[in-house]
Image (cartoon, rainbow, N blue to C red):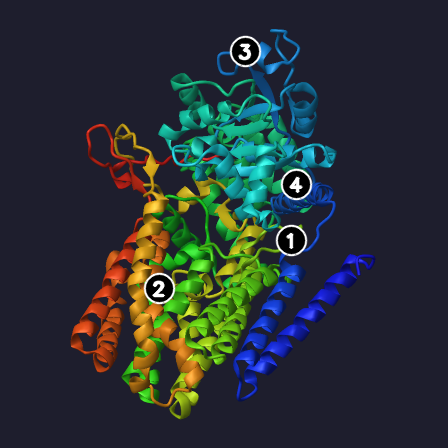
Amino acid sequence: MLGLPRRTRRRFTLLLGILALAAGLWLLLRGGLDRADKVASVGALLIALATFALTFIAPLNRNRSAASNENEQKLINLLAATVANQWSEEERFRRLHDPEPIPIQWHGLGPPISDHWNNIRTDGANSRLKVDGKIADVAEVFEQVLHRRRLVVLGEAGAGKTVLATRLLLGLLERRTDKDPVPVIAPMATWDPNEDSFGEWLSERIAADYPVMQDLRKTRELVAAGQILPILDGFDEMASHCRSVAIEAINRMGVHQPIVITSRRGEYIESIAQGDVVTAAAVIEIEALSTVTVRSYLTRVTPPIRLPHWSKVFSRLEKNPRGRLAKAFSTPLMVSLARESYSVGAANPSDLLDPGLRTKEDIEKHLLHALIPSVFDGAHSTKWGSAKNANEWLGFLARWLRKKESQEIRWWELDGEVEGFVSAAWMLAVALTFTFAWLASGLPLAVVSAIAALGSSLVYLRRIDGRPSIVSISLRRFWKPFYRSVGVCTAIGLVNFAGVGMPEIIVGGFALGVAVGTIVGVMDVMTAQVDTAKPASPAAILRASRSVALTTTLLVGILVGSTLTLAGGNTGGIYGFLSGFLSGSTSIIMSPWGKFLVARLVFSAKGSLPLHLISFLEFSHERGILRQSGPQYQFRHILLQESLAPPKPRRKLVTPVTLPPVEYDKRKVRVTIAILGTILILPACAVSITGSKILLPDVPEITRVVTAPVLLGLCPTYLIAQIILFRNRFRISTFRALMPLVFFGTFAWIMYRMASSELGSGWAKAIVGGQVLGTLLVGKACWARRPKLAVGTSGSKISAKTVPTPTSSHTSS
């Protein structure tokens, strides 16, 4: 046996387990069991469990360290391929290689804007490094000239900082070896250094943007090991009181960590004047485009047949190289907008010479407003109607982003605007579940079915992240939760068999474990993210979210419907399956895809957004109006977003209040309270086994014994606990979270009726009182998991909502 291959030994052990399991089940199902047969059947089941444990739980795993290193290198290489695919696509959509990028140039800045030269260099010299260059040389300068590979890129709005960062990223990936870190672009506006450390924020951002890095623990390890080169875009987008804190957090990482930061000049200088510079980082500033460069580029990218239309514009640039038109064309953003608006179509670039455009800002606004008509007035955009419709839809999105103080269009956050419709649909599904079950088997089973509908939807919704995941089918993720559920439920059945002496309980526990393990395992498979070199896109995660929601509905519907049908006996029938379907519908309505479906229908009916929203966003991305950052979209530039939804006038900024650190209640106290509450609930579970005979006389004995303690004893308390945890996680209103207490009150009345018929009113009051008190204790333990602020020196707590968070309307290009 020891000389056989490992795979053969595992198959042989698995075969023994199956035979032992079959023997145990045959003995249990055989009639007229005596004591010896019971012992033999239990022994066979224990042998089966042991063999399954040897097969699945503790397999021999040799050369684990070497395999782990090899898998880590594969993961890093796959991330590099994913990043390269994403930003290569972005360059294609921005037409940077049609025929070539705008020739951006920069020059180096020394102290006091940068650190001391002997800190930037590694040879100890205090002389200036030659970091001047052009966009084609950025990767070479970064690797060959900068000794510590730490860089800050400054420039005005639209100067091309993001384009330069993208060229640097792709250039580093082209030169990369297996020992080099993977460059990743991350928007700094999403980082609050007062709440999250740099490593934690970067790890979470990478895990959210790239499906291949869905394992957050592994992502943290790669970030800590220096396998990631962060390119932080938009330092000026951060709140002003966070910038100095961010620089301090980056400096604490040490000079061995390569890093790139882009920012506007004014915001960066203001931050270092209040704090410190980025240690050992060279600083470069992008230069304004000359009129010669602008004319040369626009000549190359304009079709020859339309080149005469530009003659008056070129003449004005040549005669007045410091005029308002030359100043407007000093940034690559405005040059590229002019190309998009006037290189094709009927629009004439001579409009830029209109006397009404008196200032540089007027010309910039004209170019921003001309972009959308130039895209949506062509024959290729007839699907979306007129440019007026597109302008209204994009304007709605811009106003929505301004309202939530963000720059990222995430389709799964649109439900916040129609939360009332989603909640109404959810409660309607629960009410229909209750009604169908009442019509089928009366009030007691209706209460049980409503509790099952609420509980199942909340349990599975808490297992799904608020941000939808990419689907990945892998049986390796299925087996771990499956055999755990089977083992736990079978062990519970063995314990109940020892106390009651009914062998059917073991079979019921095993069957329940298979059902629960199958559902939980499939959910883990469906919500895991895919290992692929394709970057996460909004359309991909929408399809994945739809698959997860439909799978959840199917599984929950089958489990709840089958249970209610069996519990209803001859009176269940089709009503049990309908109740199961409605129970699953509560999950699909509250899933990210279900919420988005409701929001899309509501906004489409109002005319605020198109019905096929994702297709519209994809089209806008392909035409250069939007840009993609991971699974979300952004407007091409903050100036375009502000032209569609002008920002509100700025109020006088108040000095931010320093918050005390966040604390959580002690874990030991929470666990002790939860255990005490569970103990108080156990008498109600015991009474439900015998008391349920009166309420459900037609229920089969085996079904009643297995399901009554769970549905009538534990499920209501578990439902309340899940609602509290759900509220803490998704920040729903307290009133809405307390609405299901009506169901718990009805259940307490049913429990009192059952207990009084068995033990009398005195014991019934004690049992129901114990269950209510136990539920309160369990709810308290769950409620204590929400974060709270530590007590400050004055002895009072400061709410995070009282802190003014000034937001900047600036961004990098």
Q: Which badge, 1 or 3, is on the more N-terminal residue? A: 3
User: Is residue 604 found left or right of 56 in the rendered image?
Assistant: left
Q: Is residue 732 visible?
A: no
Decide: few, some or many residues near mark 3? Use Cα within 10 Å; few <14, some 14-19, many ≥20: some
The residue sitting at 73% across, 42% down in the picture is 66
- Residue corresponding to mark 3: 116
- Residue corresponding to mark 1: 531
**Distance between the Cα atoms at labels 2 and 4?**
65 Å
Q: Nearer the viewer, mark 2 or mark 4?
A: 2
Image position of 487 with respect to 702: above or below: above
**Distance between the Cα atoms at labels 4 and 1?**
39 Å
Q: Does the residue at mark 2 contact the one at mark 4 (Cβ under 8 Å)?
A: no
The quadrant holding residue 97 is top right
Q: Which badge, 2 or 3, is on the more N-terminal residue? A: 3
Picture coordinates of residue 102 (x, y %)? 63, 34
Picture coordinates of residue 658 (x, y %)? 29, 29
Picture coordinates of residue 524 (x, y %)? 54, 61
**Distance between the Cα atoms at labels 1 and 3?**
44 Å
